[in-house]
Image: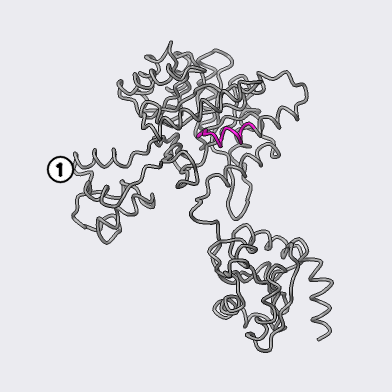
Amino acid sequence: MPKILRPMDVYKHLPGTNCGKCGETNCMSFATKLIERQVSIEQCPEIFEPKYKDKLEAMLEVLRAPVKEVTIGTGERAVTIGGKVCVYRHELTWYHPTAIAIDVHDEMAEDELLKRVEQVENFVFERIGMQLKLDMVALRCVSGSPEKFAKAADLIAKKSKLPMILCTFDQNVMEEALIAVGDKKPLIYAANEKNWKEYAKLASKYQCPLTVSAPRNPSMLKSLCRSLRNYGLDDLVLDPGTFLVGDGFNETLNTFTMLRVSAIEKEDKDVGYPLMAIPAAIWSLTKEEDEATVKMQEAYMSCALMSRYADLLILHSPDIWVLLPVLTWRQNLYTDPRVPLSVKPTLYPIKEPTGESPMFVTCNSALTYFLIRNDVESSGNGWIVCVDTGGISLQSSVAGKRFTADMVAEALKESGALEKVKHKTVVIPGYAARISGELEDMLKGWRVFVGPRDSSGIPSFIEKVWKPEIAGK
């Protein structure tokens, strides 16, 4: 079950002064928003006063998620991973979308390295009104040279704002890079049973998050985490190993699931940290000669690992067709199941419409709106009126009586849509055909067209039905 907090659980650890410095009217209001993660504890300056030290410590312990939040990098592109409070997304929601990193290495030519980093940093794809981006760069040490590794890390840090993962098991190589970029708070990869003491010192010295690696050995992973916690480190990321060939993939998914269940349902703090997976490993493990097949495997394995329960992925392929399904799945996975994706119920002008442009009515589901918007744009221009259906899809809204004639009429009047067009016609979705007669009765003097069921038919509908009918009036 998810960790459920109530306002009083948090309120009792606040100063209780109702000073308003946080921007809320009182401490109870602030406590309520803390639970919903609408504000952060840093917004309460009072609790950081020395006299409230005990309250602050208790508050941080209460607010700590079963899977600890870990921040990598600094500035506007810093990435926070973890923060999960439930095993199953439908129980509540999953916070902090899985971070996606693309790998580079220190043997790449300088111009090639910078080109790949720039490609990662500037990658953006818009879907349902949201910009889908890549988050990080993983720098691998291939040369074995501290100087080369540090130079590559410094070059990336100077040319990019992206957080970094520094990948080497050699503490001397790692420290050389940390001297150059330690102030950027990169993720150190990785401490294992052989080097954990040296890496603990580096993580402590440079105040950087640390990856703990113990492939195929959850017991060792837990033991290393306990030792590092005793050392005073708490910004940890777990790498239980990513095995992608044969039965290894099932083993990997089972291990990730076991660790996440232990952290949340069994409240095991020794494994209550974000999980890292490395789908890029498929390139060194597979014997497949067809590059397209390997890329496809990397894509679907990334989606599966994200579902069970990777908080950080390192990929190798920067191809748009590889990344798009991964980013789309991440977007879907990290929506709040309690709140459907929606847009504001109002009137939207599409491509500078005029009084002669067609007017469409639909629900305020974000996916529905953006599909219709694209098809209206392809037909020229127009107006879209979104009825408030709570973000529910059109078919469900019609079936559940959340898209009725009176609701459509009210939306048209309140949005001012009726004053925007001269032709006094409105197009309703094909799935809502049954409300057309009633809606015409309500909109006296207006004509209601029943449009296509599929929005892709809008351009054809405008040319073959709407325009001829308007011209023949």
Q: Is residue 277 above or below residue 459?
A: above
| x then y, percent, for residue 257 | 50, 30
Residue at the image position 54 percent from the left and 13 percent from the top: 145
Lateral position of residue 356 relative to residue 58, left or right: right
Q: In this view, which residue lies farthest toward the top?
A: 194
Examine the structure image and report whether residue 305 is included in the region drawn in magenta.
yes
Look at the image and give the residue range highlighted in magenta: 301-311
- Tell me which secondary structure the magenta stretch mostly adopts: helix
Q: Counting other residues with Cα less than 10 Å from the Cα at mark 1, is it few (<14), some (14-19), or many (20 or more)?
A: few
| x then y, percent, for residue 152 | 55, 24
Snapshot quadrant of residue 364: bottom right
In the rendered image, which quarter contains the C terminus? bottom right
Q: Is residue 351 above or below residue 142?
A: below
Q: Is residue 342 above or below residue 97?
A: below
In the rendered image, which quarter contains the N terminus? top left
Lateral position of residue 6 relative to residue 135, left or right: left
| x then y, percent, for residue 11 | 24, 51
Residue at the spot of label 1 = 51
Amino acid at circle 1: Lys
Residue at the image position 50 percent from the left and 50 percent from the top: 336
Secondary structure, mark 1, is: helix
Snapshot quadrant of residue 448: bottom right
Lateral position of residue 135 relative to residue 270, left or right: right
Residue at the image position 46 percent from the left and 37 percent from the top: 81
| x then y, percent, for residue 206 | 37, 25
Snapshot quadrant of residue 86: top left
The one nearer the camera, 306 or 385, is 306
